[in-house]
Amino acid sequence: MKYHKIVLAGGNGYLGTVLAEHFKTLADEIIILSRHPKDGDGNVKTLVWDGKTKGEWAGELENADLLVNLCGKNVNCRYTPKNKQEILDSRINPINLLNEVVTKLENPPKLWINSASATIYRHAEDMPQTEDAGEIGKGFSVNICTAWENAFFNTKTPLTRKVALRIGIVFGKTDAVFPRLLNLVKLGFGGKQGDGQQMVSWIHEKDIAGITEWLLEHPEIEGAVNATAPNPERNANQMRLIREAYGAKFGLPAPAWLLSIGSLVIGTETELILKSRWVLPKRLLEAGYVFQYPDMKGAVKECLNE
């Protein structure tokens, strides 16, 4: 095997499943830290934790090649005071706990990748945002992203390299954003959303897995890394590409006022659709990472393949 041990905190969700599947044939052992017990599956073992208190699971971080922290309440909800607090706590508490554990281990993980978000940058329709030249935005979502990264980096871990992966909108067959966009197309509502000019910085799930493994092999890289495909699209073109791939001849647009009503009905926020995220993976490209899906057309086609 290429690796000894991979630990996925909060690894029972969508991205955790993607990563576990990717590393299954590459690692001797994959440990998933989850709030819910689950039967073992070959070399994949689930341990129960609550993300707040130390337990027997802490010893499993010894001699790990990689720790990936994926914890965090889904932001696809209304931003009520209760939900806002849960979104923050579900990100900060596990990081604080893992920092406490990692700093006390004799042989801590060589690399710790923390999931972060490309939404940390400002609404940008004028110029792309990169790690060195991007501008941090304002508002609730950005404040969460900033607190998230600060909690991660503020504790020094001399024996563990840290990377905050600023992930764009994830495209995959089974979960995340793509199946929901495809459903809109199937129902005839696959037109532009708002004015359609907002940029969509996206990434295919296989590139999330690919980048994760690639970072293991590139010890010179640490800090914030943008995990977005190199070719973002405007919202109107994104929806056109999905319509064409599916074979839909038309798609009704959703103006901003209608999105506001719809978001109330389904319990989400229009910001998730209307914010322009124009984020480029400068550090990855400069260091030589080759994207499996650099263009949205190819990614959409793969997501539609049965």
Image (cartoon, rainbow, N blue to C red):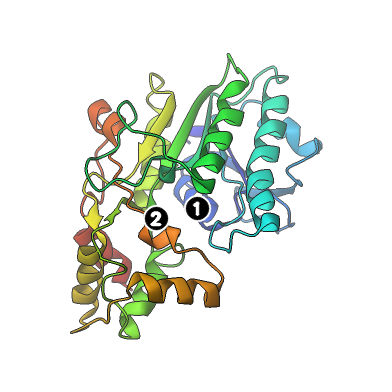
Q: Quadrant of the C terminus?
A: bottom left
Residue 240 placement: quadrant? bottom left
Q: Toward the viewer: 122 or 20?
A: 122
Residue 210 placement: quadrant? top left
Label 1 sits on residue? 15
Residue 169 position in % (x across, y down): 39, 54
Please give left or right for residue 109 compared with residue 85 in the image.
Answer: left
Please give left or right for residue 134 compared with residue 64 in the image.
Answer: left
Residue 274 position in % (x across, y down): 36, 60
Q: Residue at x 53, y 55 (%)?
A: 17
Q: Toward the viewer: 150 or 8?
A: 150
User: Which amino acid, by three-letter code, is at mark 1?
Assistant: Leu
Q: Residue at x 58, y 63 (%)?
A: 78
Contact, mark 2 vs mark 1 (Cβ under 8 Å): yes
Q: Taking 246 as reference, is 194 above or below it?
A: above
Q: Residue at x 30, y 85 (%)?
A: 188
User: Which amino acid, by three-letter code, is at mark 2?
Assistant: Val
The residues tagged by marks 2 and 1 sit, at their Cα atoms, a distance apart of 9 Å
Residue 111 position in % (x across, y down): 52, 27
Label 2 sits on residue? 170
Residues packed near mark 2 inside 10 Å, few (<14), some (14 to 19) or many (20 plus): many
Instruction: Give the SS element for disc 2.
Output: strand
Please give left or right for residue 145 compared with residue 47 in the image.
Answer: left
